[in-house]
């Protein structure tokens, strides 16, 4: 069974309440209707009820049984305004400004998660990643055992021509950390490895990517990846990790056998950690658009509670699978809080 099928199956087994702050977007409405109909999660749409109903009718879906909350006149607004004030008063915000912020979809949605009214949030179909992540960090906070918030994509290779890579893998960080230090790259690897256990239901096999393999080149950028690999090994000896390593050696056992010294992964990586946002962002989009792989995410890791992003170019299917995976990650019985 493919990873996406398993994610759907697991989400149905324990549906979570997932808030969708961009409830006015037609793609969000269609995905929410499908999610609700299939019993994958209990979606909450934010926005003006009549507007959402009109758009649902226009795209031919039924949202009459889905909870819709208008932040502008919600009974929770007074409480949420005070929450925003307490969270942001040291930054010079007054109560009037806090009340206005609490009405905005991203803030209101994250506060539903913060107060446990919802188990997770998914947004980004309309808002930029910067806005989504900034609000999530301010509303939910960063985990005490995490130094930053990073991200990963779930990549699904399910086409007949996908011979080198089959099944699913996680790519990190392709959305947030521009130029990670060795310490940050290691933290990204450790967080993503733990999320691989949750989403892929498999032992993580981590490739710390570079333009060099096992010291084949000397450069400060190579040294950074080598240092990051050593940190991962020191902090969690249970994780199989190779680095620094080139992509082809990370996915082809024959090449790994000849190029990688003391390999733990043997060319069968399922977690790929990129040395920069530039490399990761270009790579995932090339593999998605030119290679025909599915790219779901980005999923955020390092927050106190579950909140995930969408690319503004997302399709209904992208939203559907992101909601399902968010429901799985929000399951408190798994180590999903790492994400």
Image (cartoon, rainbow, N blue to C red):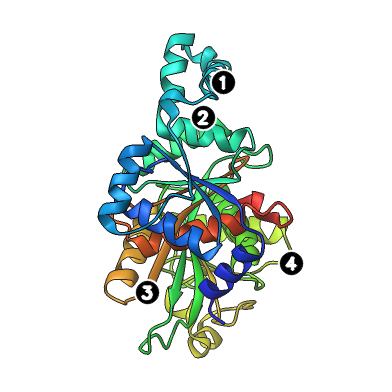
Which one is earlier in the sequence, the residue at label 3 or at label 4? 4
Which one is earlier in the sequence, the residue at label 3 or at label 2? 2
Q: Residues within 10 Å of mark 2 (few under 14, many from 20)?
A: some
Disc 4 or disc 2, which is closer to the eye? 2
Q: CA distance from mark 3 to mark 2?
A: 33 Å
Disc 4 or disc 1, which is closer to the eye? 1
Which one is earlier in the sequence, the residue at label 3 or at label 1? 1
Residue 139 percent location from the top left of the image: 53, 30
Disc 3 or disc 4, which is closer to the eye? 3
Tag 4 and tag 2, C-beta contact below 8 Å: no
- Residue 223: in sight, yes or no? no
Residue 142 percent location from the top left of the image: 59, 36
Q: Residue 238 bears which disc, if any? A: 4
Tag 4 and tag 1, C-beta contact below 8 Å: no
Q: CA distance from mark 4 to mark 1?
A: 38 Å
Which one is earlier in the sequence, the residue at label 4 or at label 2? 2
Q: Residue 293 bears which disc, if any? A: 3
Q: Residue 87 bears which disc, if any? A: 1
Q: CA distance from mark 3 to mark 4?
A: 29 Å
Which one is earlier in the sequence, the residue at label 4 or at label 1? 1
Q: Residues within 10 Å of mark 1 (few under 14, many from 20)?
A: some
Instruction: Please indicate whether residue 253 sits to the left or right of residue 320 in the image.
Output: right
Residue 172 percent location from the top left of the image: 48, 59
**Numbered disc 3: secondary structure:** loop
Q: Residue 138 bears which disc, if any? A: 2
Residue at 32% of width from left, 54% of height from top? 27
**Numbered disc 4: secondary structure:** loop
């Amino acid at each position: 069974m493919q990873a996406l099928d398993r994610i759907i199956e697991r989400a149905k087994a324990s549906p979570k309440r997932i808030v969708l702050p961009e409830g006015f977007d037609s793609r969000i409405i269609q995905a929410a209707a499908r999610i609700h109909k299939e019993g994958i999660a209990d979606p909450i749409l934010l926005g003006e009820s009549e507007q959402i109903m009109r758009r649902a009718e226009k795209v031919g879906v039924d949202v009459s049984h889905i909870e819709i909350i208008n932040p502008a006149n919600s009974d929770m607004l007074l409480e949420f305004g005070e929450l925003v004030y307490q969270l942001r008063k040291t930054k010079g915000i007054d109560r009037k400004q806090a009340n206005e912020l609490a009405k905005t979809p991203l803030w209101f949605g994250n506060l539903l998660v913060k107060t446990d009214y919802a188990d997770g949030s998914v947004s980004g179909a309309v808002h930029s990643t910067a806005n989504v992540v900034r609000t999530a960090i301010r509303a939910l906070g960063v985990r005490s055992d995490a130094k930053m918030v990073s991200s990963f994509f779930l990549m699904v290779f399910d086409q007949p021509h996908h011979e080198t890579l089959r099944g699913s893998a996680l790519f990190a960080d392709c959305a947030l950390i521009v130029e990670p230090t060795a310490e940050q790259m290691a933290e990204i690897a450790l967080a993503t490895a733990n999320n691989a256990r949750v989403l892929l239901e498999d032992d993580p096999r981590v490739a710390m990517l570079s333009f060099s393999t096992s010291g084949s080149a000397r450069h400060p950028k190579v040294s950074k990846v080598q240092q990051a690999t050593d940190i991962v090994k020191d902090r969690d000896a249970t994780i199989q990790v190779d680095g620094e390593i080139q992509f082809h050696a990370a996915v082809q056992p024959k090449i790994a056998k000849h190029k990688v010294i003391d390999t733990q992964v043997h060319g069968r990586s399922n977690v790929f950690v990129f040395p920069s946002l530039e490399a990761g962002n270009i790579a995932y989009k090339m593999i998605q658009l030119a290679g025909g792989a599915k790219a779901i995410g980005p999923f955020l890791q390092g927050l106190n509670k579950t909140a995930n992003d969408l690319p503004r170019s997302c399709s209904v299917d992208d939203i559907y699978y992101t909601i399902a995976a968010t429901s799985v990650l929000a399951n408190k019985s798994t180590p999903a809080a790492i994400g």
